[in-house]
Image: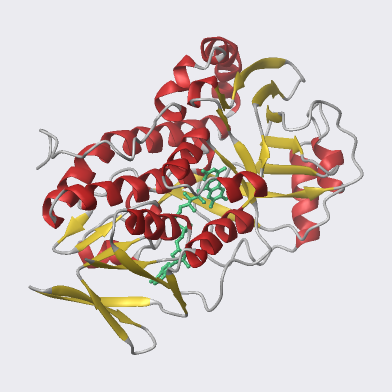
Amino acid sequence: MKALIIGGGIAGSVTAMALQKAGITSTIYEAYPHGAGNTGAFLTFAGNGMSALEAIGADGPVRQAGFDTPRLIFTNGSGRRLGEIPNGGAVSGGKISQTIRRGDLYRALQSQATQRGIAIEYGKRLIGTRNAPGGVTAIFADGTEATADLLVGCDGLRSVTRRLIDPGAPAARYVPVLNTGGYSTGVNVGGAPGDFHMMFGKRCFFGYVNAPGGEVWWFANPPRRDEPESHELSAVESRRWTEILCELFAEDAGPAVEIIRATTNRLAAWSTYDLPRVPHWHKDRMIIIGDAAHATAPSSGQGASMAIEDGVLLAKCLRDLPLSGAFEAFTALRRERVEAVVAAGARSANDKAAGPVARVIRDLMLPVVFRKMSSGKAQQWTYGYHIDWDEPVRLPANAA
Ligand SMILES: Cc1cc2nc3c(=O)[nH]c(=O)nc-3n(C[C@H](O)[C@H](O)[C@H](O)COP(=O)(O)OP(=O)(O)OC[C@H]3O[C@@H](n4cnc5c(N)ncnc54)[C@H](O)[C@@H]3O)c2cc1C
């Protein structure tokens, strides 16, 4: 069996490696003309994602590229401590969440795929497909084509594969916070390295972590009810973002303003999105996984891990079942979990965008919530998920 993998991001590289372990050959087709660059934000990569990588022996280089982030500490804009929760560890089989630059995560996965002999073709943007009884053909913008037994759409939030499977598929839903962030030097914020400090500020959410080597990595989520026009955010200059953010945090206790002023990179901001329910994940010989099927708001901290779990589980399904059964089994095994993660991410993003009244209620409720979460048991369902590679997959009773 041969597979076409569309998209060389997180899901694409992992799926190719997992399929190889399952005895299926694949080629990755990536729209961009080259591999991951050095720029871009960082992300927290949860223990369940690391556990899924371990199932295919791909966890080592990712662990080396990131750093342990064992605790999340929450405060409000007055400086009051709202609580702290473990970030992996005992709840995820000892795996501690990592903080890692996006580009480093992509590179760690892409280079492992290449080292394992998997071909990645760059500059191949999927624009269409043709189905025949014996296979599926991908049509690329450069006029070339490729044919195989199946096609896995790992092409992210704006997936073309999603539309090819179902022209009526939903588009990404805007989530009412923006995302920006950076890397700062020369600020002494104290605290243990790797502790992630999260502040529900009076007007904006802020997070920062002490990285090894003395940098402080930070992000902020300016609330924004309506979706910005596509060019609006990119037209704002870096210096202006600094002013906007310093103004948003001016009334808050804590080091937000000092950290922002010490940023060494150019600042930019992005809109954030999710995809609560995509009714059809597969059709004929095509399936979508990762953000293409169920993007979650960045606030969940689970998008990368979900994409990785998907890739490993899909490979197991294809190893143990014929094609259509494999797609049905995958959907039945994944849908409830990923949709619950997307819903949790949307709740968390909305908390960050709370208005003045909701903010008061939120700040009263959060200490109770964090107390309940402090043992880690409440996060068990996300962080504690484990894929046993050797366990056979059977068509679940809830498969269509
Ligand atoms: C601001 C921000 C912060 C985030 N923070 C976190 C976090 O802290 N923790 C976390 O776990 N997740 C986080 N995420 C989410 C995480 O980045 C995604 O869930 C993850 O990247 C999904 O992986 P994917 O492979 O499905 O999609 P992607 O990583 O987006 O990869 C899709 C790939 O497909 C390619 N592609 C697109 N269209 C085509 C086409 N037509 N043909 C060929 N190739 C194509 C793209 O170029 C890309 O390389 C964050 C996301 C954002 C935007």
Q: Look at the picture and state if 104 lies above or below 71.
A: below
Residue at (43, 41) in percent of width and height: 52
Residue at (41, 79) in percent of width and height: 124
Q: In which quarter of the image is the N terminus?
A: bottom left
Q: Please tell me which residue lies in front, 255 or 113.
A: 113
Residue 71 falls left or right of residue 118: right
Residue at (24, 38) in percent of width and height: 333
Q: Please tell me which residue lies in front, 351 or 359.
A: 351
Q: Look at the picture and state if 286 lies above or below 65.
A: below
Give the percent coordinates (x, y) of residue 265: 78, 58
Q: In which quarter of the image is the C terminus?
A: top left
Residue at (39, 43) in percent of width and height: 309
Q: What is the image's colouring? A: secondary structure
Instruction: Report if residue 229 is visible in the image.
Output: no
Residue 70 falls left or right of residue 7: right
Instruction: Report if residue 48 is visible in the image.
Output: yes
Q: Please tell me which residue lies in front, 235 or 101.
A: 101
How many marks the image carries: the answer is: 0
- Residue at the far bottom: name it: 143
Give the percent coordinates (x, y) of residue 123: 47, 80
Give the percent coordinates (x, y) of residue 59: 53, 45
Give the percent coordinates (x, y) of residue 261: 86, 47
Q: Please tell me which residue lies in front, 245 or 299.
A: 299
Residue 309 falls left or right of residue 128: right
